Image (cartoon, rainbow, N blue to C red):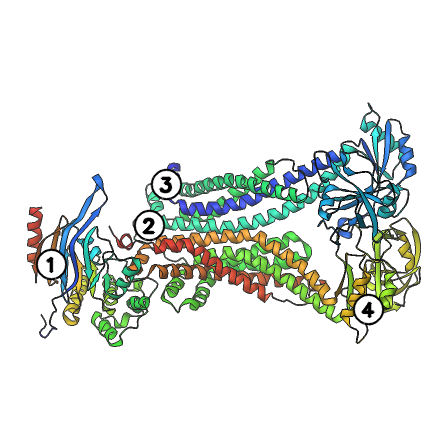
Amino acid sequence: MLRATLKSLLARKLRLILSGLAVLLGVMFVSGSFVLTDALGRSFENMFASSLADADVVVTAKPTIDVSEMEGESVPGTLTAADVTKIAGVAGVAKATGDVQADGARVIGSDGKVVATFGPPRFGGNWTGEIGGRELREGRAPAAGNEIVINAALATKAGLKVGDDVGVLTMQPKQTFKLVGIFGYEGGLTSRGPVTEVLFTEPVAQQLMLGKPGTFTSITVDAASGSDPAAVRDAIKSRLGGTYEVRTGKELADELAKSFKDILSIFNNILIGFALVSLFVAVFLIINTFSIIIAQRTKELALARALGASRKQMVGSVLVEAVVIGLIASVLGLAAGYGVGAAGASVMASMSELQLAGIGLPPMAIIAAFAAGLLVTVTAALLPALRASRVPPVAALQESATPDRPLTKLTISGAVFLAIGGGLMFYGIKESVWALLGGVLAAFIGVALLSPVVARPAVSVLGRLFSWSVPGKLGRLNSGRNPRRTAITAAALMIGIALVTALNTIITSSERSLQGTVDQTVKADLIISGQGGPGFNPSFEPALVPQMKNIPGVAAVSAEYGDQAIINGEPSWINVVTDVPATAKMFTLETVSGSMAQPGANEFVIDDQSATEHHLKLGDKVEVKHANGLDQTYTLAGIYKRGEIYGGSMFGSAAIEGMRQQLPAIAFIDLGSGANETQVRDALNAMLKDSPEMLVQNKQEYLDAQFSESAQFLLMIQLLLGLAILIAVLGVINTLALSVLERTRELGLLRAIGLSRAATMRMITVEAVVITVFGAVLGLAVGAGLGAVVVKGLADEGLKSIVLPWNQMGIYLAVGAVVGVVAAILPGIKAARTNVLTAIAYE
Amino acid sequence: MTIGAPPRVRTAAASATNLWKVYGSGEAQVVALRDVSVELERGQFTAIMGPSGSGKSTLMHCLAGLDSATRGQVHVGDTQITGLNDAGLTKLRREKVGFIFQQFNLLPTLTAEENILLPLAIAGRKPDKDWYETVIQTVGLKDRLGHRPTQLSGGQQQRVACARALVARPEVIFADEPTGNLDSKSGNEVLSFLQRSVVDFGQTIVMVTHDANAASYADRVIFLADGQIVDELRHPTAEAVLDTIKRIGADH
């Protein structure tokens, strides 16, 4: 039996290659993700290990304000010079060095623009000498307060050389320094990973990066020769007490590496998610392939049954085929994944100045590759295998085209799946992501099961578009011939298109409701905001605020400061608004109780929802522990109704003193009637020339900038779903190639009665386009449905109405048509080459 | 024979001159046609007969432009088809040639009427209304035009195929064992219909068959053996055909 199975495998190479290719691509995606994240993870591990190689023990303070990643960045604790002295006195300590290192030192490049990193920190710190692998490449160390050194990669990126005057933005507005040296790291590295570094003298670093003279972010300890770092660690720990964290260099390196690996594993999971979508699409292709193969082999199977093969053997023979394909596809997919992962890792490493730690093959990559490859193929082959086992022996003797089986069962189960899916999704939006995803999956299966019923009418309607020509009409009729096959081929394409359409619907709907809300409630004409980045918020000189107000045409300016703080023991974000009445007017905020006049220095106002949440009522006093350690008491002076896009606290001016960065980060400007926007903007831009990160935008520009971010996000998703669409195209090719094969005689006949080669290709193309456009339409409908369910489910999050992205949907439809044309090329050529003689020959 | 039939014009509708067809090369070489010259007269019903492997199908395929000649020339009407490229052959099939095959003659997705009109549709020509009516009348399928091939009997399907070949009024219709798959009653119906179209409408028909009865409907029977024309009969009867076959069988 096995031998017979393997022989029949070889006999149907093309179809199996296409199915195998689909699995291969999915497996490649899965294993490639693992290889990529593994390589990057180990590279980060090495980077941290080598940067902390010389540090025996590192002491840090516990964060003063500890918030989860969702709520913002924690405020790190600082250490003092007294701590350094204290540690230096501990037995076994040879040397204790105070380090300053904080994110947010932004260098203005020779082109006048701030050097951006797109994520990794831009460190500012103190020069502590050539330690930890640091080497001065050019110039000298900073000696005076106005001198800095920067790392070589940053120097290149910014176009700076030793001797240049360099503008640096920190907690303070722009200050100009003299670049006296450029450093790199051992091994010829121009930076330690993807970060940029600016090193000042110690007092300047403390002032600009920490806002407090005499403080440090960490203390690096060299153990005396012969002492065990762990013992030194314990000695320091017992000396300092509980508010400090004391770790050996190795522990710290491991911890840092681990936190990076956590981020990488999220990234990995996202990639795997997309890989699973591709594999899900591959399932359709495999089901189709096996069903077709079994339909073609009905006689052969019946003969085997007549000769005494049991049902179990029949199922087994199909499953063995599936296992063989799955295994081959997994092995090749793993190899391809290794290649893709390696290529990805080296591109990402070179982009982020990371020294690649060598490409490995993590066990998870192997396990996942085989699990995915085998599971997908065997699961998909199961249904066709069962069908094969039901072929009656008598079929061997019958001259029968298998009659169309009725679609009733399929239709009912499809409807059930769809209903369950819809329900799960609606429930899942609020309750659990897994229920939501399960719902989407069930809905896809439901639609796939329903699609054969829809296929015949849909195809006949779609096909009318092409019926004006004879090849078009023939193509249309052919695609309607086998609704199951057409449907499952189209359903594979549906998935990718449905997902992007759904996402697009959600984004478009939320953009539209945001636009609506802004149009209705925001009266601010201009917004000054920074292009966000890691570290400190982009900001500008407070002295500019009154000057802005004096620009002719400006009616009101309200600037905002912000930082973390602890209010009555709870971490919270606080704002200081320079002109609360103006803000209230520009955001149409209604007073609920008390006054919305500018709060006194030690007063604040808050929105009604936050007030309820924190059990605050008018006149209550709150204890605020500020980010820089300052403690203050404030009185609640007013409560306003939370606007749809504006909420939170607005504190009096005293709170500014407690912030680490005492600069406004955003300003809203109300123009008087008859003001000339262009002139005001020119004046504002001139004022902000020393704050190159600040952007003056009107309301719409500001919104559009936010929208363009979601457009980029969408683009990325579309790229990742491209593979799913590619697999669907393989399915279309498969189906067409088969049609051509099955209809050799018909094609011969058509050629004999005068159909030209070009017309033959056109006929196949129409057949393909009808299938893919059907898939695209199905995808658009399902996607719009999924999107609508999510939008409805999120109605109380501010999503007001369902808005369909018609333009994009049009593009997806066009993509569907193009995909059909492309898929038809090879089968079309094959069809056109049909030899009339062999086609009409008969035994 | 019908009295008052149109006078037969004795010019060739298709002809082969010194036609050779050789398959393979070297040891495996098979000569299917050996220097065959034949003229198929216009307005005549010609049958080509011969035992299996005699080259009768190859001859028809070469005459119809379905297969290429190794040497020699083939004309359909005034057109020399040896040496034509695919586009030229497609044009030829559209304009000058009609086919009737043994099986797989109709497209299952189209109705009988659509099948009949398909060659004209492919060529982008309008059917001549009167002629179409005449053809439909003659094949007797008026009430079956909306049916699909699966709803028709074998004989009816073959009559649809005949109608399809006729409706384009080709220079010559090639029929390859048109009754091979039919019972004798349906077969006779199809044959008399072919005969009538020759007599009534002056259509030229070339038919390959191994059935003496089928051949007896023809005006002329050409006998092939070993790739050569070995005999021919005019106005044959089934008995005469059988006798000739027997004689050829004894000679070869």
Instruction: Read off the residue under disc 2.
Output: A395
Choose between A89 and A187: the one closer to the eye.
A187
For residue A589, the mark is 4
Q: Residues within 10 Å of mark 3 (few under 14, many from 20)?
A: some
* Quadrant in the rendering for residue A96: top right
Instruction: Give the number of the mark in front: 4 or 2.
Output: 4
Instruction: Read off the residue under disc 1.
Output: B221
Residue at the image point whose x is 87% and y is 41% from the top: A202
For residue A46, the mark is none
In the picture, which quadrant includes the N terminus of chain A? top left
Q: Position of residue B68 (x, y in %)?
A: 24, 53
Instruction: Read off the residue under disc 3.
Output: A309
Mark 4: amino acid: Leu
Tell me the SS state at disc 1. Answer: strand
Mark 3: amino acid: Ala
Q: Position of residue A500 (x, y in %)?
A: 58, 58
Q: Whole-Å distance between the Cαs marked 3 and 2?
A: 14 Å
Tell me the SS state at disc 4. Answer: loop
Q: Position of residue A578 (x, y in %)?
A: 87, 63
